[in-house]
Amino acid sequence: MIERRLFKDLGGADHGWLRARHHFSFADYFDPKRMDWGSLRVWNDDEIAPNTGFPAHPHANMEIITYVREGAITHKDSMGNVGRTEAGDVQVMSAGSGVRHSEYNLEPEKTTLFQIWILPTKTGGQPGWGAKPFPKGDRSGRFVTLASGFANDNDALPIRADARVLGATLKAGETTEYAIGAARHGYLVPATGAIEVNGVRIDARDGAAISDVDVVKVTALEDSEIVMVDAA
C-alpha cells in the first residue's frame, strides 16, 4: 500500500525566520491520524532564513537526522561538538539521556532541510553527534544508506534505532528498487522532481507512506533527489 500525502495538505507554521511543513503531528499541528509511522515520529520540511536559526534547546531519547537540501546548517551542542553540514550531506544526533543543541543558518542565503526524528530502540545512554558528506554522484541511480541502526551498514552514520535513512538521485526514466519487507514502515519524500512509487505518482515534497510492501520500486518521471526512511 502506498498512501500519497500531498505537500499542500501538510500541517505547518510560518514564523518569519522559519517556514515549516510537518508530515506528522508536531508543535501546534495535531492530527491524530498522523502521529507517527512505526518508529518514525517526525519529518519536518524546514526553510530557515539567513542568519537565523534554533537557539539552544534540550532533547532526550530521540534519534534526530538532518538532511540538508540547500545552503548549510551550523550545529553546536552541550557535548562540545561544532559542525557545519552542507547541502546533500547529513548529520545525526542521538539525544540519549539528554543534550542541548543549537542549529543556525549562518549563510547569506536560505537553508532548506528535512529534519527526521526516529524513536530509539532503548532510552537513555550517552548522547552523541556526527556528520558526513554523501556526494550525490555516489547515489546516482541507486539507494545509499545515509544513517543506520544496523551494524553491517559500515559507511552510514550510526543511529540507535531499528531503522535506516536512505538517499538516491535518479535521472528521468531511471528506476531503482529497495527490498523493505512487508512488516516494515517506509516513508519516502522527493526533495526535488516527480517520481512513481510502485505505480503511485509522488511529486516534489509530497510524502509516500509505504506499508505491506516487500519491494519499493521507484521510477523517476523527472530528475529527482529522494530521501526514504525504513523503520520498524
Image: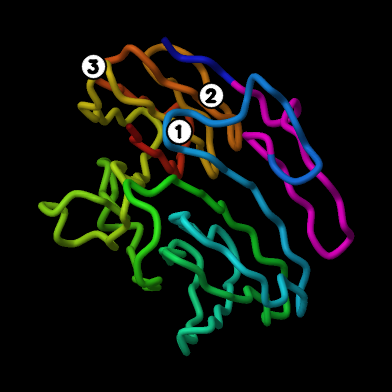
168 vs 56, left or right, is: left
The image quadrant of residue 10 is top right
Q: Amino acid at mark 1?
A: Leu
Identify the disc placed on residue 120. Answer: none
Q: At numbered mark 1, what does the secondary structure look like: helix, strand or loop? A: strand
* Neighbours of disc 3 within 10 Å: few (<14), some (14-19), many (20+): some
Tag 1 and tag 2, C-beta contact below 8 Å: yes
Q: Judge whether 160 appears above or below 86 on screen.
A: above
State the residue at coordinates (40%, 73%): 129
The residue that disc 2 covers is 202
Front disc: 3 or 2: 3
The answer for how far apart the CA atoms under marks 3 and 2 are is: 19 Å
Q: Is residue 20 left or right of residue 179?
A: right
Q: Which mark is residue 188?
A: 1
Q: Nearer the viewer, mark 1 or mark 2?
A: 1
Q: Residue at x 18, y 62 (%)?
A: 155
Task: State which tag comes first along the sequence, 3 or 2.
Answer: 2
Query: Does residue 100 belong to the magenta stretch?
Result: no
Q: Amino acid at mark 2?
A: Ile
Residue 198 image point, x, y percent = 37, 15
Please state the extent of the stretch shown in magenta in the rendering.
Answer: 5-25
Badge 2 crowding class, 10 Å Cα cut-off, few under 14, some 14 to 19, many 20 or more, is: many
Confirm or deny contact between disc 1 and disc 3 (CB under 8 A).
no
Q: Residue at x 25, y 51 (%)?
A: 149
**Looking at the rendered structure, which numbered label has been put on residue 214?**
3
Q: Is tag 1's residue or tag 2's residue first in the polypeptide sequence?
A: 1
Q: Amino acid at mark 3?
A: Asp
Please give the name of the residue rendered at 16% of the width and 53% of the height, measured from the top-left corner.
153
